[in-house]
């Protein structure tokens, strides 16, 4: 197994390298790319333009630019925003926490709901309960997230006035810590539910089919023949095996944290990385865009790797082969 | 008279499929004394596994259901027990092993924990005591390095070793009866004999009765005291082992025994398969289920034959006396005619057909 | 899934005889019957057919033009003249829904076709030639699979797309081909393993045709399932793009761009949000149901009730 892990890590590094090159080229190939922002700025004189180009290193050959960029990036320096000159790393740092809160809570919430739903669906498969859960799952999978967000905002915010619909907290009030926390939760709950819907739907279906397959295995019959009760059979034998594939799926889905919340964050005006991305895109803030693209890809590849390793670790057949 | 260990009376298990009701077990009865070894034989689909699962009440409830009969174990009808009481019987009083030891063991649990599970449940031992007993059991079934092996996973064992683990698991709580459903079918021939010998010796040592289910007559020959022959969900013959091999009476049993090629046959003897195919359990023909394939069939076979005593402790469900030479000749002739009508020619033991010129004379 | 692949690789290879072709046609019949038994999938298919017909025959269903402005009747509630009401500029929502549906459905389907075409081609090339070509193509596939989809698509559409249908179609198609490519490549590899592992001959044209005839039946099923589900996700992708203003832009309109418009005025008229989104939702739901129905119909190991 060690060889397998090492091989996967090497593959991941190679992939990352290819990815960084690809993204770099992409950004520089965009109409309105880094050089163009300066080149077409009518307020600059030719000399000033050339000075800026030289200063940003934009006149160097492309591979050199890449080299400078990647070596700096590996040290954590992603340059400075075109918009306000802040260090990109600082910008990302501010927003990453918010995205993590939103995405993390959505994932946990989804997991808490999806596993029982999938298990119940499998145990009672082809009954009314199963059909209901399946219907809900299909709804969740087919639902366009941004529309769901709008609907939720309309119903809960505008028409019922139960919950706030934008932002992370209410400004302008000086609330004591407890109330601030409650206020924060109130702001968190709607986007969290919206974001988690797709996961709940997908994971519960996955859990259901994994569980269904597991229940039909011979060792479940052996467990019953030993006299084990339904709960013990379920937990010690069925779940143990059925959860393994789900763990890998969850790990991979966690990898989409960087870009996955973009839509939800924008609809709910949650100050996270996704919204930063959209704003930077509108402003053509290339250093930020490039950094975010690369970081998202890193996270995706990293979690794919974690998923593979987890699977190998959790399944004894692979662990001891 | 001591109570019989197991009395199965007119057991019926049906499966409700979309196309209709499959009567997998349709009136099966047999007895088992304590410590006795009984073999249940028949071709695939005859209902022998379903019988065993019905005794353990492990039939999947839709679509299957035990619709009639009694299963008296130590005097108590298992079909009347609540599920919780039945769980105490499973593993505790009756142990069962299955055909494929690889898939019958949980791949993500150590065999130590799988063994200890049942012991903790039925014998109420602590985890450590259960593990010790598990190691003992492994040793008894002939697995070396028992202490170390407790922490191993099923895929790290060979097929034969896994089946030994299964046997250990089934016997771990000192059950009175061991049901073995095709225990050697998935194993290499060389390992088969070892496993059978293990079952025989361990069960003898603990006085455990054995119900051995198989389609292989060779397996039951050396292992059992009595044999029950099943066909299409019914018992067709039952006799002590020696008696059955010496004096088979039911046409199906005759067919089964003559299917086995023998070392002492002359080379030109033909192999005699049983003509025809197993019946459709969805729409069984009325009367004797074997009649369509039977050379001895007479008009009376349209009615279901009763169980008749044909020898010492020997019963068969047939209208015909198959020891009658006239009936035998007629059956032989009819068999050849059936084969010719189907366009099949009998296969020679040498693999050539009787129409080859070289084999005449 | 693995059992199926295994079965596909160990099943004996047969000559394509007339008897076989006859048998295959009845196999299609079997698959069709199994699909028909799945009532939910059939319902989804019917809804899709109705919807397709509705948007194709839009001029027959409504006399209003989707671009006709009527400032006298803004935010009108549903009525006979305007079954879905009107929006903030007096456009007839029903007409907009129908004509917008044309765009949404067309984009979904054509981007799927382009993506599948790319995928099958790349997969075939990779599987057929093997070696470094296969390696290279698989690395590229991995890169495409690892990119954060929405982010990249946003960037690309903001920079390259002119809001026309064609560019949106290509944009979406670029990120939908990977699964089909892997599938086809896998089939090629399986065949190669079976047929030519002992013979070290070079693969000539005759062999290519032979391989293709064996690969298509095996691969066609999963590709069709993937394609159907792909349409659904493409429709959503287009809708998200248009909603953010990166996809379809005026004068073209799709359901997604309708929602972009609706978001600004949603407190005035919530119906403007409900309707286009509901249409997207129902369409994608039906494609998912049909796709899953096809998958079940094609799966030889599905356990009967």
Image (cartoon, coloured by chain):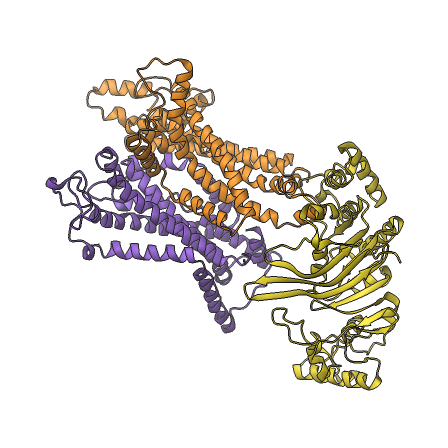
Q: Which chain is yellow?
A: B
Q: Is residue A94 left or right of residue C218?
A: left
Q: Is residue A161 above or below residue C256?
A: above
Q: Nearer the viewer, residue B204 or A40?
A: B204
> Residue A53 at x, y = what percent?
30, 21
Chain that is orange in the image: A
Give the total number of marks visible in the rendering.
0
Across and down, in percent, residue B361 comes to 82, 86
Q: Nearer the viewer, residue C38 or B353?
A: C38
Q: Where is residue C105 shown, x and y percent of the image?
A: 30, 50
Residue A43 locus on image (x, y percent): 19, 20
Q: Is residue A198 left or right of residue A283?
A: right
Image quarter of the N terminus of chain A? top right
Instruction: Judge whether A2 appears above or below B58 on screen.
Output: above
Can residue B263 be seen in this snapshot? Answer: no
Task: Judge from the rendering whether residue C129 lies leftward or rightward of residue C60; answer left or right.
Answer: right
Chain C representation colour: purple
Of the pair B121 and B105, the residue shown nearer to us: B121
- The answer to whether A150 is drawn above or below residue B78 in the figure is above
Res. B153 visible in picture:
yes
- Residue at 77% across / 71% down in the picture? B256
């Amino acid at each position: 197994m060690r060889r397998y892990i090492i091989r996967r890590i090497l593959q991941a590094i190679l992939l990352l390298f290819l990815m960084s090159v690809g993204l770099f080229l992409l950004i520089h190939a965009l109409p309105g790319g880094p050089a163009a922002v300066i080149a077409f700025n009518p307020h600059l004189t030719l000399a000033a333009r050339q000075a800026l180009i030289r200063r940003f290193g934009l006149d160097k050959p492309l591979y050199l630019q890449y080299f400078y960029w990647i070596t700096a990036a590996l040290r954590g320096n992603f340059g400075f925003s075109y918009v306000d000159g802040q260090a990109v790393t600082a910008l990302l740092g501010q927003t990453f926490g918010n995205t993590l809160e939103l995405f993390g809570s959505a994932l946990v919430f989804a997991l808490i709901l999806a596993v029982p739903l999938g298990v119940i669906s499998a145990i009672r498969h082809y009954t009314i309960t199963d059909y209901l859960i399946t219907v809900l799952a299909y709804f969740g999978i087919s639902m366009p997230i941004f529309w769901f967000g709008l609907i939720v905002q309309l119903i809960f915010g505008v028409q019922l006035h139960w919950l706030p619909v934008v932002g992370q907290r209410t400004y302008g009030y000086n609330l004591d810590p407890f109330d601030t926390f409650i206020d924060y939760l109130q702001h968190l709950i709607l986007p969290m539910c919206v974001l988690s819907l797709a996961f709940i739907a997908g994971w519960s279906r996955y859990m259901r089919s994994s569980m269904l397959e597991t229940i039909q295995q011979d060792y479940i019959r052996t467990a019953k023949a030993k006299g084990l009760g339904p709960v013990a059979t379920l937990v010690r034998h069925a779940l143990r095996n059925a959860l393994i594939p789900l763990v890998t799926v969850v790990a991979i889905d966690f990898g989409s944290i960087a870009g996955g919340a973009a839509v939800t964050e924008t609809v709910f005006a949650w100050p996270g990385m996704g919204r930063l991305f959209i704003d930077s895109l509108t402003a053509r803030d290339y250093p930020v865009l490039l950094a975010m693209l690369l970081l998202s890809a890193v996270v995706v590849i990293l979690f794919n790797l974690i998923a593979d390793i987890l699977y190998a670790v959790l399944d004894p057949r692979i662990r001891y082969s | 008279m001591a109570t019989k260990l197991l009395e199965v009376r007119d057991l019926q298990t049906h499966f409700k499929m979309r196309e209709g009701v499959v009567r997998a077990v349709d009136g099966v009865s047999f007895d088992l004394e304590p410590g006795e070894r009984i073999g249940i034989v028949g071709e695939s689909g005859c209902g022998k596994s379903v019988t065993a699962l019905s005794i353990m009440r492990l039939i999947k409830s839709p679509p299957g259901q035990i619709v009639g009969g009694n299963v008296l174990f130590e005097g108590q009808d298992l079909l009347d027990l609540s599920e919780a009481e039945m769980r105490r019987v499973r593993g505790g009083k009756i142990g069962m092993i299955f055909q494929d030891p690889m898939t019958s063991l949980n791949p993500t649990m150590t065999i130590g924990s799988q063994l200890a599970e049942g012991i903790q449940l039925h014998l109420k031992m602590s985890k450590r005591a259960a593990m010790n007993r598990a190691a003992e059991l492994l040793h008894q079934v002939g697995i070396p390095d028992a202490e170390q092996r407790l922490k191993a996973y099923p895929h790290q064992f060979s097929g034969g070793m896994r089946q030994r683990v299964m046997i250990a698991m089934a016997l771990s709580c000192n059950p009175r009866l061991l049901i073995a459903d095709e225990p050697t079918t998935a194993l290499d021939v060389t390992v088969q004999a070892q496993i059978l010998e293990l079952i025989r010796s361990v069960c003898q040592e603990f006085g455990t009765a054995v119900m051995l289910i198989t389609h292989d007559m060779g397996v039951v020959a050396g292992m059992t005291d009595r044999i029950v022959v099943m066909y299409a969900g019914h018992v067709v013959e039952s006799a002590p082992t020696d008696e059955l091999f010496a004096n088979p009476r039911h046409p199906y049993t005759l067919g089964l025994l003559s299917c086995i090629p023998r070392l002492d046959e002359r080379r030109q003897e033909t192999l005699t398969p049983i003509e025809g195919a197993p019946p459709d359990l969805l729409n069984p023909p009325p009367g004797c289920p074997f009649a369509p394939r039977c050379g001895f069939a007479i008009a009376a076979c349209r009615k279901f034959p009763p169980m008749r005593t044909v020898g010492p402790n020997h019963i068969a469900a047939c209208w015909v006396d198959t020891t009658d030479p006239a009936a035998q000749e007629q059956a032989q002739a009819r068999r050849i005619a059936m084969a010719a009508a189907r366009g099949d020619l009998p296969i020679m033991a040498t693999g050539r057909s009787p129409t080859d010129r070289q084999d005449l004379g | 899934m693995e059992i199926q692949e295994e079965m596909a690789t160990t099943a004996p290879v047969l000559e394509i005889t007339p008897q076989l072709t006859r048998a295959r046609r009845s196999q299609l019949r079997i698959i069709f019957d199994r699909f028909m038994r799945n009532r939910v999938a059939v319902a989804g298919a019917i809804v899709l057919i109705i919807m397709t017909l509705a948007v194709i025959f839009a001029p027959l269903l409504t006399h209003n033009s989707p671009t006709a402005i009527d400032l006298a009747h803004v935010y009108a509630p549903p009525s006979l003249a305007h079954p879905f009401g009107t929006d903030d500029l007096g456009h007839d929502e029903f007409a907009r829904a129908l004509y917008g549906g044309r765009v949404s459905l067309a984009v979904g389907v054509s981007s799927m076709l382009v993506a599948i075409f790319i995928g099958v081609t790349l997969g075939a090339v990779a599987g057929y030639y093997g070696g470094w070509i296969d390696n290279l193509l698989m690395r590229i596939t991995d890169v495409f699979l690892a990119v954060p989809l929405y982010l990249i698509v946003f960037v690309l559409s903001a920079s390259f797309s002119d809001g026309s249908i064609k560019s949106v179609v290509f944009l979406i198609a670029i990120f939908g081909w990977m699964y089909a490519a892997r599938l086809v490549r896998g089939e090629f590899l399986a065949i190669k393993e079976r047929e030519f592992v002992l013979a070290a001959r070079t693969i000539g044209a005759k062999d290519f045709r032979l391989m293709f005839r064996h690969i298509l039946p095996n691969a066609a099923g999963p590709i069709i399932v993937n394609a159907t589900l792909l349409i659904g996700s493409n429709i959503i992708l287009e809708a998200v793009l248009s909603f953010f203003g990166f996809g379809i832009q005026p004068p073209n309109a799709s359901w997604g761009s309708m929602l972009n418009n609706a978001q600004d005025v949603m407190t005035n008229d919530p119906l403007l949000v409900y309707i286009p989104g509901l249409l997207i939702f129902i369409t994608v739901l039906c494609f998912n149901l049909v796709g899953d129905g096809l998958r079940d119909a094609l799966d030889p190991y599905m356990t009967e009730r």
